[in-house]
Image (cartoon, grey):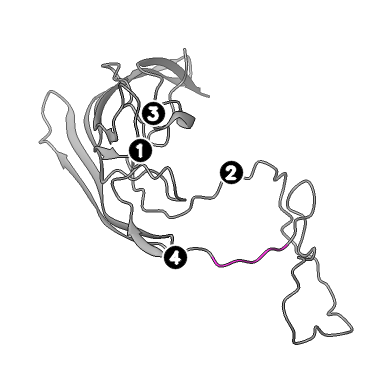
């Protein structure tokens, strides 16, 4: 049975980093080597078009220093978060937690013109897909050694600018709501404490919205999960 990914309640996605994973990096060298200055200083002339080897090796082979000006990005939006605890009773501890992020703008240069790409799939620029709104609502219950939760996850609709969709597709990308549940029980085994957890992701087996973009297998893996309903069971023992 596949184990679930960890879903933090924080879904803030205003981070601007789109760097790819450093697959080649083995171990960075923390102490940087010193290098004496050149005996002949560089001339005040045009920059050398051929980059030179510099710095400490942080991958399989030493890298080469290449400098360039990155595009400017201007982002604006807001986050909302709130938690409500119901009065304690014989039913146990009950609470509701809500988190949401809404993007107002995400402006990048496209063909020399500043363009807002919020609400777009962004197949033809360096930005990731950017739905305007993402929200989570979690209902939690706890009583003694028993805990349970039910979480709703919402992603608003957006669209792609890729032209000429084939039959069965359009430029629109539907919104999606999925539900997750989890139950856990803590108990003693001899002198150790154990916890068994049973859960299910995407309880209603929602399919990801279809996207007119063949390279991504007709859905958006950056926002949606195509694996459908998944159940998991785990056991943790603390000695």
Q: CA distance from mark 1 to mark 4?
A: 27 Å
On the image, which quarter does residue 36 sit in? bottom right
Q: Work out whether mark 4 precedes mark 3 in sequence or the reverse, and give the earlier one.
A: 4
Badge 1 is on which residue?
A: 163
**Do tag 1 and tag 4 residues touch (Cβ < 8 Å)?**
no
Image position of 153 (left or right of 226): left
- Asked whether the viewer can see residue 184, the reply is no
Q: Nearer the viewer, mark 3 or mark 2?
A: 3
Q: Which residues are magenta?
A: 65-69
Q: Nearer the viewer, mark 1 or mark 4?
A: 1
Q: Judge the density around disc 3: few (<14), some (14-19), many (≥20) Cα neighbours within 10 Å.
A: many
Residue 206 rendering spot, x and y as whole percentages = 29, 20
Residue at left 13%, top 23%? Answer: 91
Q: Work out whether mark 2 precedes mark 1 in sequence or the reverse, and give the earlier one.
A: 2
Q: Nearer the viewer, mark 2 or mark 1?
A: 1
Badge 3 is on which residue?
A: 219
- Asked whether the viewer can see residue 224, the reply is yes
Circle number at residue 21? 2
**Do tag 2 and tag 1 residues touch (Cβ < 8 Å)?**
no
Image position of 48 (left or right of 129): right
Q: Dot 2 lies on which element?
A: loop
On the image, which quarter does residue 44 sit in? bottom right
Give the residue at the far front of this rendering. 164
Image position of 140 (left or right of 38): left
């Amino acid at each position: 049975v596949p184990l679930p990914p960890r879903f933090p309640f924080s879904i803030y996605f205003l981070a601007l980093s789109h760097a790819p994973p450093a697959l080649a990096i083995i171990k960075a060298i923390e102490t940087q080597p010193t290098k004496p200055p050149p005996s002949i200083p560089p001339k005040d002339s045009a920059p050398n078009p051929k980059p030179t080897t510099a710095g400490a090796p942080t991958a399989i082979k030493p890298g080469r220093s290449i400098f360039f000006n990155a595009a400017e990005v201007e982002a604006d939006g807001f986050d909302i978060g709130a938690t409500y605890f119901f009065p304690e009773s014989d039913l146990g501890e009950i609470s509701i937690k809500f988190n949401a992020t809404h993007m107002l703008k995400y402006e990048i240069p496209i063909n020399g013109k500043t363009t807002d790409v919020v609400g777009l799939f962004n197949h033809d620029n360096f930005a990731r897909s950017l739905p305007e709104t993402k929200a989570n609502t979690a209902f939690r219950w706890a009583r003694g050694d028993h805990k349970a939760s039910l979480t709703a996850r919402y992603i608003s609709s957006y669209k792609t600018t890729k032209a000429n969709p084939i039959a069965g597709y359009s430029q629109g990308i539907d919104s999606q709501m999925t539900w997750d549940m989890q139950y856990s029980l803590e108990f003693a085994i001899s002198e150790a404490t154990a916890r068994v957890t049973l859960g299910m992701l995407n309880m209603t087996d929602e399919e990801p919205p279809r996207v007119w973009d063949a390279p991504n297998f007709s859905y958006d893996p950056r926002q949606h999960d195509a694996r459908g309903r998944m159940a998991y069971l785990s056991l943790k023992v603390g000695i």
